[in-house]
Image (tube, helix red, strand yellow):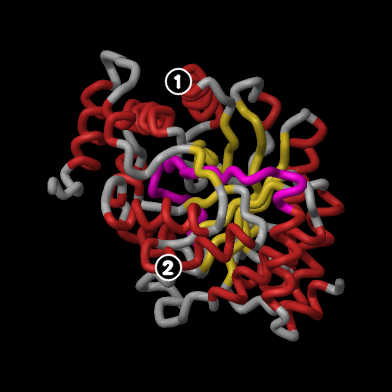
C-alpha cells in the first residue's frame, strides 16, 4: 500500500483498518494517558509562528517569574502516579531552566513515579549530564517539510535538532519528535517525515493538531480535519509498525480520540487534566477508548485513586491544591 497516495486519495477507512491490525499485533490493546509537564511559560527564542509562548514573550518582563514552582511540578508528578498517567515528557521553553536544574527535577520525578522521564526542553548540547533519570530526548521538529519548518520555526534549525538526536542515540537515550498538523503541510510531506524517522531511528512520534492561538498568524485558521489527522497517523503506523505513536487532541475535539486510536495511537495527550478530571469531558475520553475496543491504563474519573497516595511534606500543599482543583469540577448526584 502506497500510504501517501492513499491519503491523497482519501482512502482513509482502509488505511485505518490496516493500521489498527498492525497496532494490535505489535503493541496490544492498551492505551495510555499521557501528560506533558510544563516547566515554564517563558521561551527566550519565542518566534515559532504557531506557539502560545510567542505571544507571551513581549509581555514577560522578568522571565524568572514565568518559571513554575519546582514543588508544584513534583506534586503534578505524584498526581499522575496516583491516577496511572504517564508523564509524556518535561517541556519548557528555551532558557527557562538550566540543564542541571532539569536533571535534578527529572531525578526527583523518577523517585516519585518509578520511571525515567523524556525531555522536550529545546535544542541542547548538554545531554551528557543526564543519566538513568532520563529515558529519551525529544526534538520539537513540528513540521517535516524543511522549507516550511525553516519559515515557521526560524530559531530551531533542523540540523541542530538532527545533531541533538544523533548525540542522544550515541548516549543511549531513546529519540522522539513532535509534529503539529494543520500548519500548511501536504500529504506529500509525509515523505520527509518517513525519511526523518528512518534516518534518525526515531522511537516515538507525538502528533498534535493545530490549536490556533490569538495573536499568531494561525489565530483564524481551522484545526485539521479529523480524517486527515487519522489518515496521517494510520499512514505512519503502516510504515513503522513498531514506532510508539502519541496523539494529542483538545477538549473541543474529543471525537478525534476513537479514530486516532484505531489509526495506530498508543497513547493520547494534551488534556487540561485539572479541569477535565471526573467531568463529562473526562468520562468522554474513557468512552472513546472503550468504544475503540481498547483498554485504558490510568483513569480520568476514579476519585479514590486521585485522593490516595504518598505524602511528601514539601509537596503536600500543592498536591492538596491539585486534588481540590479536580474535585471542584465534579457534580455530586
* Residue at 51% in and 32% down: 98
Binning the other alpha carbons within 10 Å of mark 1 as few (below 14), some (14 to 19) or many (20 upward) gives some
Binning the other alpha carbons within 10 Å of mark 2 as few (below 14), some (14 to 19) or many (20 upward) gives few
Residue assigned mark 1:
112
Taking the magenta stretch, the answer to whether it contains residue 29 is yes
Which one is nearer the viewer's eye here, 244 or 188? 244
Residue 306: image x %, image y %?
A: 31, 32
Left or right of residue 66, residue 196 in this image: right
Residue assigned mark 2:
253
Which one is nearer the viewer's eye here, 214 or 234? 234
Among the 4 quarters of the image, the one containing residue 26: top right
* Residue at 65% in and 49% down: 139
Examine the rendering and report whether any part of residue 177 can be seen. no
Q: CA distance from mark 1 to mark 2?
A: 32 Å
Question: What segment is highlighted magenta in the picture?
Answer: 23-47
Which one is nearer the viewer's eye here, 91 or 33? 33
Amino acid at each position: 500500500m502506497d500510504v501517501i497516495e492513499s491519503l491523497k486519495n482519501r482512502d482513509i477507512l482502509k488505511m485505518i483498518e490496516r493500521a489498527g491490525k498492525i497496532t494490535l499485533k505489535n503493541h496490544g490493546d492498551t492505551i495510555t494517558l499521557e501528560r506533558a509537564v510544563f516547566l515554564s511559560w517563558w521561551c527566550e527564542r519565542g518566534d515559532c509562528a504557531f506557539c502560545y509562548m510567542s505571544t507571551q514573550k513581549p509581555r514577560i518582563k522578568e522571565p524568572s517569574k514565568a518559571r513554575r514552582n519546582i514543588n508544584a511540578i513534583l506534586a503534578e508528578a505524584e498526581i499522575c502516579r496516583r491516577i496511572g498517567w504517564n508523564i509524556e515528557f518535561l517541556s519548557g521553553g528555551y532558557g527557562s531552566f538550566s540543564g542541571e536544574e532539569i536533571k535534578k527535577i527529572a531525578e526527583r520525578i523518577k523517585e516519585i513515579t518509578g520511571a525515567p522521564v523524556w525531555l522536550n526542553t529545546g535544542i541542547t548540547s548538554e545531554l551528557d549530564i543526564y543519566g538513568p533519570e532520563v529515558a529519551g530526548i525529544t526534538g520539537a521538529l513540528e513540521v517535516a517539510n524543511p522549507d516550511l519548518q525553516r519559515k515557521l520555526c526560524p530559531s530551531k534549525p533542523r540540523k541542530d535538532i538532527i545533531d541533538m538526536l544523533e548525540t542522544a542515540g550515541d548516549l543511549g537515550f531513546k529519540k522522539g519528535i513532535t509534529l503539529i498538523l494543520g500548519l500548511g503541510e501536504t500529504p506529500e510531506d509525509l515523505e520527509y517525515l518517513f525519511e526523518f524517522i528512518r534516518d534518525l531511528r526515531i522511537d516515538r512520534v507525538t502528533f498534535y493538531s493545530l490549536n490556533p492561538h490569538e495573536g499568531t498568524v494561525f489565530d483564524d485558521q481551522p484545526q485539521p480535519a479529523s480524517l486527515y489527522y487519522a489518515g496521517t497517523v494510520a499512514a505512519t503506523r503502516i510504515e513503522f509498525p513498531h514506532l510508539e505513536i502519541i496523539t494529542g487532541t483538545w477538549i473541543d475535539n474529543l471525537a478525534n480520540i476513537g479514530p486516532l486510536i484505531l489509526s495506530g495511537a498508543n497513547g493520547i495527550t494534551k488534556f487540561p487534566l485539572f479541569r477535565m478530571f471526573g467531568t463529562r469531558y473526562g468520562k468522554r475520553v474513557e468512552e472513546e477508548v472503550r468504544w475503540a475496543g481498547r483498554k485504558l491504563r490510568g483513569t480520568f474519573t476514579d476519585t479514590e485513586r486521585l485522593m490516595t497516595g504518598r505524602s511528601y511534606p514539601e509537596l503536600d500543599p500543592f498536591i492538596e491544591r491539585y486534588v481540590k482543583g479536580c474535585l471542584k469540577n465534579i457534580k455530586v448526584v
